[in-house]
Amino acid sequence: MEPKASQSLELIESVNEERVYSEEFLDLLSTLPKERDVFGDNFYQYKGFWFHIKPLHGLVESLKHFQPRKNDVFLVTAPKSGTTWLKAIIYTLLNRPVHHPQDPHHPLLTKTPHQLVPFLGLLKPSEYDLISNSPDSSTRIFGLHMPIIGLPKAVIEDNGSGNCKVVYLCRDIKDTFVSFFHFLNQHLEPSNNCLENLFDLYVRGVSPGGPVWDQIMGYWKGSLERPDKVLFIKYEDMKCEPHVQLKRLALFLGKPVSEEEENTGLLDQIISLCSIDNMRKLEVNRRGIDDSLGMKNHTFYRRGVVGDWKKYLTAEMAAKLDHITEEKFRGSGLFL
């Protein structure tokens, strides 16, 4: 049965649609610490992490109402850590029985990865069960920018969650920050174009789903404690050894790449289809606006280059991020 991949776009509400928040949720907001972002909108701190109002509402609702299916897959990242790229890769890996990567009608040629793999926190509870983006009805693919506390407990624990999988993609924090800045910079008014202001918020942990270091450590520890449930992948490893990481990812998802598939060039075909260069030139990614985020589609595709931060950060900024990273990760066995 062919997955109803196009359904996801229709389900996600327009960013301009006003949500009605319950009194209970508004009461919660009134108790939370808050900060202004570079757009002047509020971040709220919930359980030690920072969220804008809409994702926070989505998190609270999903913790209450989301019921995982047996083989659901959750792709988690900090913003601008390779989210769009890995959404495309995971979608292609899981859907290869019905959409070979060389299929001239492959959904990725006419729909964005965010349309095919929606963010869980931007869905309403009534939409959860309508998502159909894999050939298997027991498997849905969701994206998240949430810390591990934002996952429904049933996803990680063994109380009826079946074989749910969490894939966490981590990137050098300096590159993540620079990519995040360039992404926001395309949507800022010139008077607000200030790298320093964003940097100040970022190092204080005020970013979507941040502090980014605490988000990363949550999933790193989760991958050590539950390697059957949580796979931790480094962006840099995906770039330098894509074949190795694709096979590792496919095996973790329970869809290993066969010898025949490998011999016929499947891995190279997936890498080519999902590459930043290829996706950037597709008409669907060059025009239009992502309805769930209100961002222009082309802004999700930048360079994806490892070490790009060297062109933009001062030595002092880079040293500051490195110092925090070393302090946060000390003794964990994780090195970025």
Image (spheres, grey):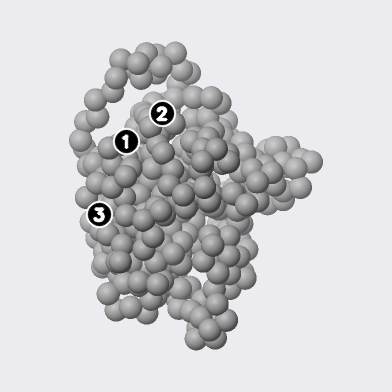
Q: Do the residues labelled 1 and 2 touch (CB within 8 Å)?
A: yes
Label 1 or label 2, whichever comes before in sequence order: 2
Which residue is under mark 2? 64
Q: Would residue 87 be seen by someone viewing this image from the given angle?
A: yes
* Farthest residue, direction bottom: 264
The tag earlier along the polypeptide, 3 or 1, is 3
Query: Three-letter amino acid code at disc 2?
Result: Lys
Label 3 to label 1: alpha-carbon separation: 15 Å
Residue 60's place in the image compared with 307, above or below, is above
Residue 82 lies, with reference to residue 51, above or below; the image says below
Q: Mark 3 points at which residue?
A: 7
Q: Between disc 3 and disc 2, whose residue precedes?
A: 3
Residue that sits furthest to the front in the current view: 160
- Residue 212 drawn above or below residue 110: above
Name the residue located 40 percent from the left edge and 72 percent from the top edge: 97
Type of amino acid at the residue the image marks with label 3: Gln
Which residue carries the number 1 mark? 125
Q: How crowded is mark 3: few (under 14 residues within 10 Å), some or many (20 or more)?
A: some
Q: Which mark is residue 199?
A: none
Label 3 residue SS: helix
Q: Which residue is drawn at 44% across and 64% down?
A: 94
Q: Distance between the residues labelled 3 and 2?
A: 24 Å
**In terms of depth relative to the viewer, which is nearer, 282 or 164?**
164
On the image, the x and y values in percent for residue 69 come to 43, 47
Horizontal side, residue 162 vs residue 84: left or right: right
